[in-house]
Amino acid sequence: MNAMVQKLFRIFVHVVMFFIARIEIEGVENLPSGGGFILASNHLGRLDSALLYYAIDREDIIMPVAEKYKTHWVFGPLVPALGGFFINRFDADVHAIREVLKRLKNGGIFVIAPEGTRSKTEALQQARPGVAFFASKTGLPVIPIALTGTEDRAVSENLKHFRRSKITIQAGAPFTLPSLKGQDRDEALELAVAEIMCRIGVMLPEKYRGYYAGHPRLKELAGAAEGQKVA
């Protein structure tokens, strides 16, 4: 990993974002200053990954990128230079799994979009269990991240009219998941990933909640959040 490349890329991202977006970051106090943890975010558009380098100034970011970008003329060389790596999203990529676990053990930040791909509906899709596996396997805290305003459609429309997009990044309170040992693995993973997605969803406006909008756990979290506001 090249620290200078990361530094230059962050400068580039900050300059670009200044011209195309107004960014609000909430819940910064929920981001640990050191040590390993997992950031789990909804995935709306192409700007999502860049926002990571806008909001977090650390060099130990673990960011898997879809294998389809491996031959891309920009992302092909850029991803490894930033410390990222390519992953097969549809099969068990043993090499990638080992790489993530090794870096997490060394105190890195693992950034993952549990949905696996950008949402075509601009709302939450059913998530894959990968994030729950890593969280349960390592026992590290998960920090849910809710993004709004990064939809490709909306960003493109604003650029056409020389408008800056309003983007919000909200970090929720960290939490941990129980170990998978002694449990029905598939059922435990399903419950764990739903917990993560509902914690993301409760921070999003209702129109973004999609697949998890009617989930009992999201309704429970929403009720608790409303109760805190009243109190």
Image (tube, rainbow, N blue to C red):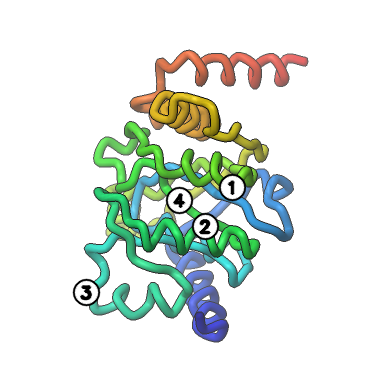
Residue 141 found in image quarter: top right
Mark 4 falls on what kind of element? strand
Q: Are marks 4 and 2 in contact (CB under 8 Å)?
A: no
Could you give the CA–CA distance between mark 1 and mark 3, rounded to whole angstroms?
A: 32 Å
**Disc ID at residue 34:** none
Instruction: Identify the residue at horizontal 50%, vertical 63% (top origin).
Output: 62
Q: Which residue is mark 2?
A: 101
Is the C terminus in the top left, top right, bottom left or bottom right quadrant? Answer: top right
Q: Which residue is mark 1?
A: 138
Closer to the camera: disc 1 or disc 3? 1
Depicted 65 relative to depicted 77: above or below: above
Question: Quick one: which residue is furthest to the front in this view?
Answer: 182
Q: Which residue is mark 4?
A: 112
Could you give the CA–CA distance between mark 3 and mark 2, rounded to whole angstroms?
A: 25 Å
Instruction: Identify the residue at horizontal 51%, vertical 18% (top origin).
Output: 217
Q: Are marks 4 and 3 in contact (CB under 8 Å)?
A: no
Q: Amino acid at mark 4?
A: Ile
Question: Where residue 73 appears, x then y in whole percent?
Answer: 24, 79
Could you give the CA–CA distance between mark 4 and mark 2, rounded to whole angstroms?
A: 13 Å
